[in-house]
C-alpha cells in the first residue's frame, strides 16, 4: 500500500512511532517535567512486557512452594521460609525478595517478612490460586511461541490434553478440571448477575454447565426460576453428587446430551453460554447457536458471557491472553461483541445487544433475542 493511500490513522501512527523511536525525543522526554513522568511510565510498561515471564514464574513459585500460605499464618524470617519451602537460605531470600518486588510479600522488620497487598488478596482467593497452578500447562505450551503458532492445530498440546472431556473426567484430573470450572463460572456469575436481570425468566438452561457452579449460583440469585444444565453424560455424572451435597436436586434438572448431536431440551425461556462459545471455532460456534435458536420459544433470550476481544480496558486479556490460550488449546478464539453478533444473526436471532460488566477482564455479556 502506497503512502498516498494510507488512512489518517495510519499516517498519525507512523508519525507517533517515529517520534517515540527517536533517541533525541527519548532523551528530551526523560529530562522535562511533567513529560518525564509519562516517559518513566512508558519505560516501566515496556520493561514489564520484557520481564513478564519472570513475574509469572515468581508467582507460580510463591504458590507451589507454599510461601504465601506460610506468610498468611504470620511473620516469618528467612530460615523459617527456607525450611517451609525446602530451599537453601540464599534461595529462600531470593524468592521472598522477588515476591516483595511484585507486592506478594513485604518486609516488616529486620529479617521479618509478611504478605504484601497482592499476596493478601491472592491468599484469600483459592480460585485464583487454582488458576495459577493450572497455568503451568500454558507456560509449557508457550515455551516456544512461534513453534506453537506454526504447528498443526491438530497436534496435541498440554492444554488440549487437559481440556479434552474424555481425558478430564476421571481421577485426579477430574478434580482439577471440576475445580477450575467452578472457579471460572463463579467469577462469571458475579459479573453476569450484576449486568443482567434474570428475574424476568421462569426457566433458565445453562448449556455446557459442567458441574453446576453457574447454575447453583443462579438458583440462589433467582429463587423463583427453574434451572437446568445441559452437558455430556459423563460430565453430569459428577454433577448429580455436587447438587445432592448442596441440596439442589429439586431445583436443578440435568439434561445429558451433546449439543453437536442432541437436540436441546425445550421449556426454557432463557439459555446461557458461560465461557463456552469462545472455546469453539466459527463453524462449531455457529452450530451451537443454531441449536439454541431452534429450541428457544418466541420472546426467548440467549445470554453469552465470556471475555471478549476488542474490549476497552481489557484488550490484553481478550486479545492477547485468550488469543494464545485458545490457540494452545487447539480450539476456539476470542471474539468481539460485534463478531458474536454476526454469528447470532447468521444463526437466526432477531437482534442482540452488549451489556456492560464491572470487570470485563473477567467477562463481558451479549444478550440476543429470538
Image (spheres, rainbow, N blue to C red):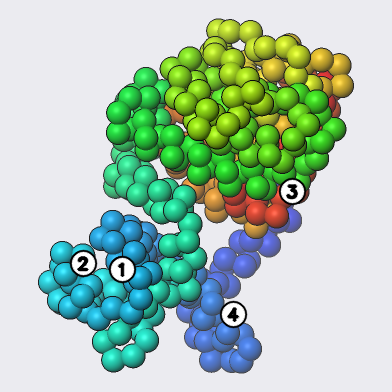
Determine crowd level at label 4: few under 14, some 14-19, many 20+ residues with C-alpha closer than 10 A.
Answer: few
Residue in view at x 28 percent, y 61 percent: 66
Above or below for 217 versus 368: below
Q: Nearer the viewer, residue 321 or 220?
A: 220
| Residue hosting label 1 | 70
The mark closer to the camera, 4 or 2, is 2
**Mark 2, mark 3: which one is toward the viewer?**
2
Q: Are marks 1 and 3 in contact (CB under 8 Å)?
A: no
What residue sits 45% from the left and 19% below the top?
A: 237
Disc 1 packing (10 Å; few <14; some 14–19; many ≥20)? some
Residue behind mark 3: 194
Q: State yes or no: discs 1 and 2 in contact (Cβ < 8 Å).
A: yes
N-terminal-most mark, 1 or 4: 4
Separation of marks 4 and 2 at Cα, in angstroms: 42 Å
Q: Position of residue 269 (x, y in %)?
A: 79, 22
Depth check, mark 4 against mark 3: the one in front is 3
Which quarter shows the N terminus? top right
Residue in the image at 30% along x and 33% along y: 172
Q: Position of 253 compared to 258: left or right? A: right
Point out the frontmost of discs 1 and 4: 1
Determine whether 43 is above or below 331 in the image: below
Residue plotted at (36% across, 84% down): 107
Give the Cα separation between the discs numbered 1 and 2: 7 Å
Please tell me whether mark 3 sits on a helix, a strand or a loop.
helix
The x, y position of residue 199, in whole percent, is 82, 36
Q: Residue under label 2, please give it.
A: 84
- For discs 1 and 3, the disc positioned in front in the rendered view: 1
Q: Which residue is mark 4?
A: 38
Pointer 1 or 2: first along the chain: 1
Cβ–Cβ below 8 Å for labels 2 and 3? no
Amino acid at each position: 500500500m502506497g503512502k498516498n493511500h494510507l488512512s489518517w490513522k495510519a499516517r498519525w501512527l507512523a508519525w507517533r512511532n517515529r517520534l517515540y523511536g527517536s533517541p533525541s525525543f527519548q532523551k528530551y522526554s526523560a529530562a522535562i517535567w511533567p513529560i518525564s513522568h509519562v516517559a518513566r511510565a512508558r519505560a516501566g510498561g515496556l520493561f514489564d512486557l520484557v520481564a513478564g515471564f519472570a513475574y509469572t514464574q515468581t508467582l507460580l513459585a510463591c504458590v507451589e512452594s507454599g510461601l504465601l500460605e506460610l506468610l498468611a499464618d504470620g511473620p516469618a524470617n528467612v530460615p523459617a521460609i527456607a525450611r517451609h519451602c525446602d530451599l537453601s537460605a540464599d534461595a529462600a531470600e531470593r524468592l521472598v525478595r522477588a515476591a516483595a518486588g511484585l507486592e506478594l510479600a513485604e518486609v516488616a522488620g529486620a529479617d521479618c517478612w509478611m504478605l504484601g497487598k497482592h499476596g493478601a488478596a491472592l491468599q484469600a482467593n483459592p480460585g485464583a490460586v487454582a488458576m495459577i497452578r493450572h497455568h503451568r500447562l500454558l507456560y509449557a505450551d508457550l515455551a516456544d511461541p512461534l513453534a506453537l503458532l506454526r504447528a498443526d492445530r491438530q497436534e496435541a498440546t498440554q492444554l488440549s490434553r487437559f481440556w479434552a472431556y474424555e481425558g478430564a473426567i476421571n481421577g485426579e484430573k477430574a478434580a482439577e478440571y471440576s475445580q477450575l470450572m467452578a472457579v471460572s463460572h463463579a467469577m462469571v456469575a458475579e459479573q453476569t448477575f450484576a449486568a443482567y436481570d434474570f428475574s424476568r425468566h421462569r426457566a433458565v438452561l445453562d448449556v455446557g454447565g459442567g458441574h453446576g457452579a453457574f447454575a447453583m449460583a443462579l438458583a440462589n440469585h433467582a429463587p423463583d426460576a427453574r434451572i437446568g444444565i445441559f452437558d455430556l453424560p459423563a460430565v453430569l455424572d459428577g454433577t448429580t453428587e455436587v447438587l445432592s451435597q448442596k441440596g439442589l436436586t429439586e431445583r436443578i434438572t440435568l439434561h445429558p446430551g451433546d449439543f453437536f448431536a442432541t437436540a436441546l431440551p425445550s421449556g426454557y425461556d432463557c439459555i446461557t453460554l458461560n465461557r463456552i462459545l469462545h472455546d469453539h471455532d466459527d463453524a462449531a460456534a455457529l452450530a451451537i447457536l443454531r441449536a439454541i435458536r431452534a429450541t428457544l420459544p418466541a420472546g426467548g433470550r440467549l445470554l453469552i458471557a465470556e471475555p471478549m476481544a476488542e474490549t476497552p480496558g481489557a484488550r490484553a486479556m481478550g486479545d492477547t491472553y485468550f488469543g494464545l490460550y485458545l490457540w494452545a488449546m487447539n480450539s476456539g478464539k476470542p471474539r468481539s461483541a460485534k463478531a458474536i453478533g454476526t454469528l447470532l444473526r447468521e444463526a437466526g436471532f432477531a437482534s442482540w445487544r452488549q451489556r456492560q460488566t464491572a470487570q470485563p477482564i473477567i467477562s463481558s455479556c451479549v444478550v440476543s433475542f429470538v
